[in-house]
């Protein structure tokens, strides 16, 4: 926004300081004037004018002294106010410089004002925290964009290779080619839809409604039951009503991704998935546990990163696009919740999603 030039804050503080100092001087002189009137050093003549009483030299001695004192106070107020204002506003100058650097795209610098807590240092600490979060967010977005570009390039490259092979060999079986192109195209569509879902959740561009997580868990379980039976996995669902607010579509996607991930990353046979819902003070909890291989503690935090698929980047018919838990994390944060991943001692993973609750009596009738 273009603004007209004006006085600097330092100059305003200087003039204010000098003005108050001059006002104090005027009040002091007026007090002395009234004191001398009461003591008889000054008196009113027949014409009503104030004059010194006989034997005093007030008007000749005090008036010039008062004028000199006021002049000194003015100069002292301006000079002292300018110096004091400069020292007081020095932290603000550092904050302003850091803000200008941030507008150019530099997010790695910090203000780090020394000294005890005051308004300026609280502002600087808040700004440093904001810069740290922005830097982490931008870095995450850059990694996500790089990974997304790589993942999208893969199906396109495969499609190009298949078409090149078909062009070089016109007599090749087109049925096999069509099936492979269909599979590659389906994967590209799934990836694109997943990216759009992540973007939508991050922008929080959804209408909040009343949702029961227990119903979401039942619907996701019923949808994925054929997949679980195909892999020999048993799904156990239990829990209480878990009322919250949010997007039903996104929360269903969250629950479906968790159950799907628990089925795919399980034991080869006779595995189990436990889906439970519960209520805590001020929050509802959805927990999905599964059996499986032992997971290293340092691997678990990376599972919510985009395009991570367990211990390695695999491509199978059920490997997904590598955004399952990343979508869960994004949807959870968009609903002001927390996501916790814990490796089970017996193998497998325990994932808990905690969301703000609603009052069952007032909201669920």
Image (spheres, grey):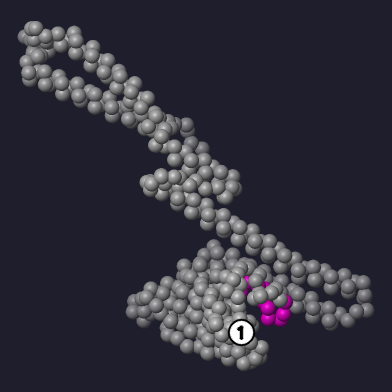
Residue 263, horizontal then vertical, whole percent: 61, 84
Span of residues in magenta: 315-324
Front residue of this view, candidates 117 and 154: 117
Q: Residue at x 36, y 27 (%)?
A: 80
* Label 1 element class: loop
Q: Residue at x 60, y 78 (%)?
A: 295
Q: Which residue is mark 1?
A: 292
Residue 52, horizontal then vertical, whole percent: 11, 10
Q: Residue at x 59, y 56 (%)?
A: 138
Quarter of the rendering occupied by the C terminus? bottom left
How many numbered circles does the render carry? Answer: 1
Front residue of this view, candidates 298 and 72: 298
Residue 194 picture quarter: bottom right
Q: Which class describes the residues within 10 Å of circle 1: few (<14), some (14-19), or many (20+)?
A: many
Magenta stretch, overall SS: loop
Residue 148, horizontal then vertical, whole percent: 68, 65
- Verify whether residue 321 appears in magenta: yes
Question: Viewed as shown, does residue 116 lie left or right of 157?
Answer: left
Residue 91, horizontal then vertical, whole percent: 44, 40
Residue 325 picture quarter: bottom right
**204 vs 138: above or below:** below
Q: Residue at x 93, y 75 (%)?
A: 169
Front residue of this view, candidates 25 and 220: 25
**202 vs 256: above or below:** above
**203 vs 53: above or below:** below
- Verify whether residue 239 appears in magenta: no
Question: Viewed as shown, does residue 151 lie left or right of 135?
Answer: right
Q: Would you say residue 327 is visible in this rendering? A: no
Q: Would you say residue 52 is visible in this rendering? A: yes
Residue 297 picture quarter: bottom right
């Amino acid at each position: 926004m273009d603004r007209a030039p004006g006085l600097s804050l330092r100059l305003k503080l200087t003039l204010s300081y000098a003005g108050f100092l001059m006002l104090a001087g005027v009040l002091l002189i007026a007090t002395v004037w009234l004191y001398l009137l009461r003591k008889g050093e000054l008196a009113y003549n027949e014409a009503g004018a104030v004059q010194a009483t006989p034997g005093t030299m007030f008007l000749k001695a005090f008036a010039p002294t008062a004028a000199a004192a006021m002049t000194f106070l003015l100069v002292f107020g301006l000079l002292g106010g300018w110096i004091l204002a400069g020292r007081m506003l020095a932290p603000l100058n550092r904050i302003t410089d850091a803000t200008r650097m941030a507008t150019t795209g530099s997010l790695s610098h910090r203000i780090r004002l020394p000294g005890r807590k005051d308004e300026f240092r609280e502002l600087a600490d808040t700004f440093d925290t904001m810069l740290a979060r922005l830097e982490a967010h931008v870095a995450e977005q850059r990694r996500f964009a790089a990974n997304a570009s790589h993942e999208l390039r893969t199906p396109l490259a495969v499609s190009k290779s298949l078409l090149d092979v078909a062009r070089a060999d016109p007599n090749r079986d087109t049925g096999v080619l069509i099936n492979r192109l269909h599979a590659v195209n389906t994967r590209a569509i799934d990836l694109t839809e997943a990216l759009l879902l992540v973007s939508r959740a991050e922008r929080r561009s959804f209408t909040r409604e009343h949702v029961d997580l227990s119903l979401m868990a039942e619907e996701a379980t019923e949808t994925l039951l054929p997949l679980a039976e195909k892999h020999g996995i048993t799904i156990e669902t239990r829990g209480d009503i878990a009322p919250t607010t949010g997007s039903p579509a996104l929360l269903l996607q969250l629950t479906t991704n968790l159950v799907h991930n628990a089925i795919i990353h399980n034991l080869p046979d006779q595995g189990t998935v436990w889906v439970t819902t519960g209520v805590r003070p001020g929050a509802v909890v959805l927990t999905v546990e599964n059996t499986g291989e032992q997971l290293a503690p340092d691997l678990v935090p990376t599972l919510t990163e985009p395009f991570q698929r367990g211990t390695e980047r695999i491509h199978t018919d059920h490997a997904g696009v590598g955004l399952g838990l990343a979508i869960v994390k994004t949807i959870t944060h968009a609903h002001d919740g927390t996501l916790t991943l814990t490796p089970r001692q017996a193998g497998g993973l325990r994932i808990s999603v905690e969301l703000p609750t609603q009052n069952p009596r007032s909201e669920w009738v």
